[in-house]
Image (cartoon, rainbow, N blue to C red):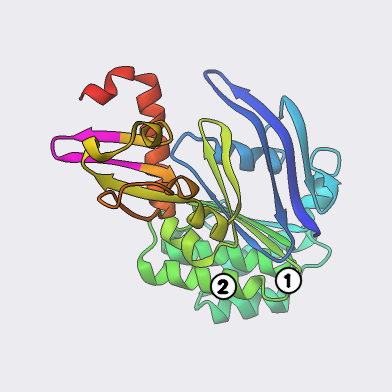
Amino acid sequence: MDNILEITGLCKSYGDFALRDVSFALPRGYIMGFVGENGSGKTTTIRSILNMAKIDSGKISVFGLDSVTDTITIKERMGVVFDSLYMAEHLTARQIEQQLRPFYRNWSKEEFLGRLRSFGLPDNKRVGDFSKGMKMKLMIAVALSHKAELMILDEPTSGLDPVARDELLDILAEYIADENCGVLFSTHITADVERIADYVTILHGGRVWYTGTRDDLTEKYVVIKGAESELPAEKRTQCIGFHAYRNGFEAMLPADALAGMPSVIESEKASIDEILVYIAKEDKHERHPAHDAL
């Protein structure tokens, strides 16, 4: 399978935070949801891919090219959508088009103006006066107008209303329809990941906690609940984010550890949101051994 993005052994330190041995790959033709709690390292990883941060060690390959030595070539073939507009807000969309055109060999003015029309964006209004959803669409229009093969989105749906979020997901689905492009989609809204992502990478504390297909992830873990006295001791050691309360307990468990579980213990498939919550609970438990007594 042809990978459009490969990260191997990425390490990057910032004071008291560090990415440690981050490795994952995005196959061409797919969308990867890139998730994790705030401070997990998602933005640092994206900055490293874009060569905006100098990595300490490891290798990042985009289109089979080195992210450092081939950065100009890579950026010409890549589109980026941040959670805030990176363009001069006093300009109109037409003026922005005139500024960007010389930087891209494959730039199409016709494509850009066509995207503005299809997205319902005015070409003669200051882009600083656009709504957040309109700004997001403008950044996507720019990416599509120079035939970007890889689109990287860093929290693009933050603050968007449900209609704008739905429109974005439809645009991304259309974008990868020809199976020649790829999308790395960083977000904290896991419902969007569950709807559109083919692959998921979870970062936690600067490390990769999971990387693989979305379907494998959602089949891999279950949430269990019940009376703590009914939970076998050997199952308790396999729990992730175990939390006891007055009337029982709840925890996440690898699905393959359900065999032999008493029928009085309830179980259901874990959502991506729940997986993130229980990872955080496990981390808190490890840092505070007295947590079980609470």
- Nearest the viewer among 88 and 62 is 62
Query: Marks 1/2: CA distance?
Result: 14 Å
Main SS, magenta region, reads: strand
Horizontal and vertical percent position of residue 135: 50, 62
Tag 2's secondary structure?
Answer: helix
Q: Are marks 1 and 2 in contact (CB under 8 Å)?
A: no
Question: In the figure, 95 relative to 83: above or below?
Answer: below
Instruction: Give the quadrant of the N terminus.
Output: bottom right
Which residue is under mark 2?
171
Classify mark 1: residues with Cα within 10 Å, few (<14), some (14-19) or many (20+). few
Give the residue type at disc 1: Glu
Going by the numbered disc 2, the residue's amino acid type is: Ile
Q: Estimate the x, y position of residue 92 in percent, counting from the top left.
A: 56, 65
| Residue 11 is covered by the magenta coloring | no
| Coordinates of residue 69 in the picture (x, y in percent) | 86, 39
In-image side of 2 versus 48 (left or right): right
Is 230 left, or right, of 76 in this rendering? left
Whole-percent x and y of residue 247? 14, 40
> Which numbered disc covers residue 179?
1
Q: Is residue 136 visible?
A: yes
Res. 126 visible in picture: no
Quadrant that contains the C terminus: top left
SS for callout 1 = loop
**Of the residues under marks 1 and 2, which one precedes in the sequence?**
2
State the extent of the magenta-drawn residues as a range.
Answer: 243-251
